[in-house]
Structures are given as C-alpha cells and as structure tokens.
Amino acid sequence: MSPKVSQEHKEQRRKQLLQAAEEVFIEHGYENTTMKHVMDKAGVSRGGLYQYFDNKEDLFEALIGEQQREIIDESLQAMIEEQGSCWDALLMTFLGEEKTASDTMDPLAPSKLEYFITGRNEKRRREHAKERYFHGFRVTAKIIEKGVEAGEFQPRFDPEVIARFIISYVDGLAVDHAILDSESIKLKEQTQLLIEYLKWGLNVKE
C-alpha cells in the first residue's frame, strides 16, 4: 500500500509546479508553451503534472489566479496600514512594492495578453477576463473609497471612473510593451504621468 501524501506536501508540490510554469510561460509565451516544457522545467513525470492540472489552460489559470486572491475588507485594511497610507496602497496595486515608475513590467504580462486575446471568443476565457477585470476594479475602487473616508483623497472625478481608468491605462501599457519595447513607448515616463495625473485627479492630501 502506498503511503499517504500529506496535504502540506501536495500544496508544496503544486506551488513548485506553478513556479516552474511561470518561468516557462515567461520564456516561451502562452501559445508556444507546452505541458512538456513545464514537466522538464519542474523535473516531474507526465503523471506528476497531470495529477494537479488537466491541461495548459487549467495550469495557466491557476498561475494567474494566485495573483488574484479575493481581498476582503480586513485584509485590505491591513494592506493599507502596512503601506502607511491609501495612496501608497493604491500605487502598490499597479507598481508593486517599490511604488515607483520604471521601465520594467510584469514579465508574465505578454502571456496573459496572448491567453485572453487569442481566446476572446471562448466563453471560458471571456468569463475569466471579466472576473479579473472586476476583481481589479473592486480592489482599486475600495482603496479609493477608504482614502476618501480617511480624508486622504478629495476626488475631482467619480472614484469608480478613476478606478476603471487606472486599469485601462495599465492594460494599455501592457499591450504596447508586449508588442514594442520600453524605449519605444517610454514606459517609465508614461507611468510617471499616470502617477501625477492620479495625484491631481484624486486631489491627494499629503
């Protein structure tokens, strides 16, 4: 009789497979990646990978889902407190922990674009894209709402419109960055412009 595998071990193995998959998707892109690439990178057998993921689509959705855990009020408030202000928490949502404009972007972004754009006519991917959009919108809008409540922000525009603008602007930069390069689109400069515009649009009280 084979020994039971603990839940902790399963979770650790799943995490390792996702880490390997991330490296492969970054290197090859979504369309050119195969499950064999992931097996080789992770050093597992076919059965070892398919035990956790049914196919490439399932694997990729699990990978990007790790970055999209639902944020409830308690964890959102904790994040704001950790960052020191609603403004810093807002910047972190699209700039990362550094919270500064740079010429770098999420290295997985081109694969995400491939996944959603090439599958735009597939119901499963369209629903997933909609879910991701509204997740980002809810988190962004909630941070702005809390900033208003705290007296940090006095928005010049509808806060929900500002939240949607941030998402659309960043997504647009991601598309251009995937097709062109940071020098062509001036990623750092455009991101700095976004920051300055948001500071004005939210009427940030520092």
Image (cartoon, rainbow, N blue to C red):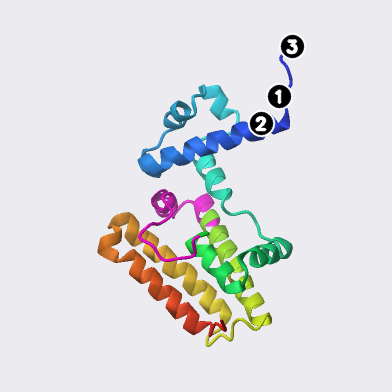
Q: Which mark is residue 52?
A: none
User: Do labels 3 and 2 touch, CB within 8 Å?
Assistant: no
Write the residue at 28% across / 57% down: 181
For the residues bearing labels 2 and 1, Cβ distance under 8 angstroms: yes
Which residue appears at 36% of the width and 39% of the height?
Answer: 32
Which residue ends up furthest to the left in the rendered image? 184
Report the residue marked by disc 1. Answer: 5
Q: Quadrant of residue 127?
A: bottom right
Could you tell me the amino acid type at mark 3? Met
- The answer to whether residue 47 is visible is yes
Q: Position of residue 106 (x, y in %)?
A: 43, 54
| Depicted 14 relative to depicted 100: above or below | above
Q: Is residue 193 above or below residue 115?
A: below
Q: Earlier in the sequence, mark 3 or mark 2?
A: 3
Q: Quadrant of the N terminus?
A: top right
In percent of width and height, residue 197 lies at 44, 80
Quarter of the rendering containing residue 132: bottom right
Numbered range of the magenta stretch = 98-127
Mark 1 closeness class: few <14, some 14–19, many ≥20 residues within 10 Å: few
Residue 54 visible? no
The amino acid type, in three-letter code, at marker 1 is Val
User: Disc 3 designates what residue?
Assistant: 1
* Label 3: element kind: loop
